[in-house]
Every structure is written in structure tokens, then in C-alpha cells.
Image (cartoon, grey):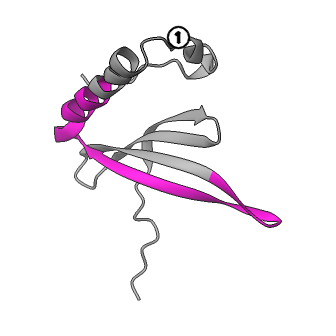
Amino acid sequence: MEDNRGNDREEIFSKRVKAGKRTYFFDVKSTRSNDYYLTITESKRRVNGDSFSFEKHKIFLYKEDFGKFLEALQNTVEHVKTDLMPEVDFSQFDEEESEYDDELRWD
């Protein structure tokens, strides 16, 4: 049996976003060849009787896809705000978590 301990790379930068019952983690990690990639993790607490566990889903995003990913995300959010829900004042949600106002930029 192969020992995989230590294969999870150390974070270079990490940002946590609390969103209701979920928490999102944006982590920059380094490869062995000193290249960088981003992991986006969604973590949701699950109650199991008297104890609890965390259900996690992870996306790995590499530098060559940063621009495409960011553009698709921005276009999708803009479509929801403009075309599907123009009557909603989305700024009301920005005020809730002012601690997490930092804007992600991949320039």
C-alpha cells in the first residue's frame, strides 16, 4: 500500500468565504516545480446523529485556465443578475460579510 501522506501541497495563500451553511476555500498551492494552481473547496457540515462530518468538493484550477474560468463565472453571474433576476438588489448581500470583500483578480 502506498503512503500518500504529505502529498497535499502546502497553501501559499488562502481565503475563506462563509456562505450560510457552506464555507468556500480559495487556496493557492505550489507544484514541485514551483508552478502555482488554485483549489476551490466547498465544505458543508453534515450532522450524523450525535456527531458531525464535513462533506467537501474540490476543483483544481491551473494558470492556463484562470482567464477562461473567471470570464465564464463573471458572465454567468451577470446573466443571473441582469436577465434572470433584474428586480433583486444584489448589493444587500454584499453588506452581510464585509470581512470577505476582497475581490479575486487573476491578472
Left or right of 70 on screen, residue 90? right
Residue to which mark 1 is pinned: 91
The one nearer the camera, 91 or 52, is 91
Q: Bounds of the magenta span? A: 45-74
- Which residue is nearer to you in this view: 10 or 89? 89
- Horizontal and vertical percent position of residue 1: 41, 89
Name the residue rendered at 44%, 51% in the picture: 10
Q: Residue at the location (32% across, 50% down)?
A: 60
From the top left corner, tell me how far across and down residue 12 is, in percent. 42, 40
The answer to whether residue 1 is visible is yes
In the drawing, does residue 15 fall left or right of residue 82?
Answer: right
SS label for mark 1: helix
Tell me where residue 84 sits by quadrant: top left
Position of residue 93 measured from the top left corner of the image (x, y, whole percent):
57, 18
Residue at the limit of the structure toward the left, as seen here: 64
Relative vertical location of residue 89 with respect to residue 56 in this rendering, above or below: above
Whether 70 is drawn above or below 46: the answer is: above
Query: Is residue 42 located in the magenta-colored stretch of the structure?
Result: no
* Along the viewing direction, whichever of 101 and 45 lies nearer the viewer: 45
Q: Residue at x 25, y 47 (%)?
A: 34
Q: Quadrant of the C terminus?
A: top left
Q: Is residue 95 left or right of residue 29?
A: right
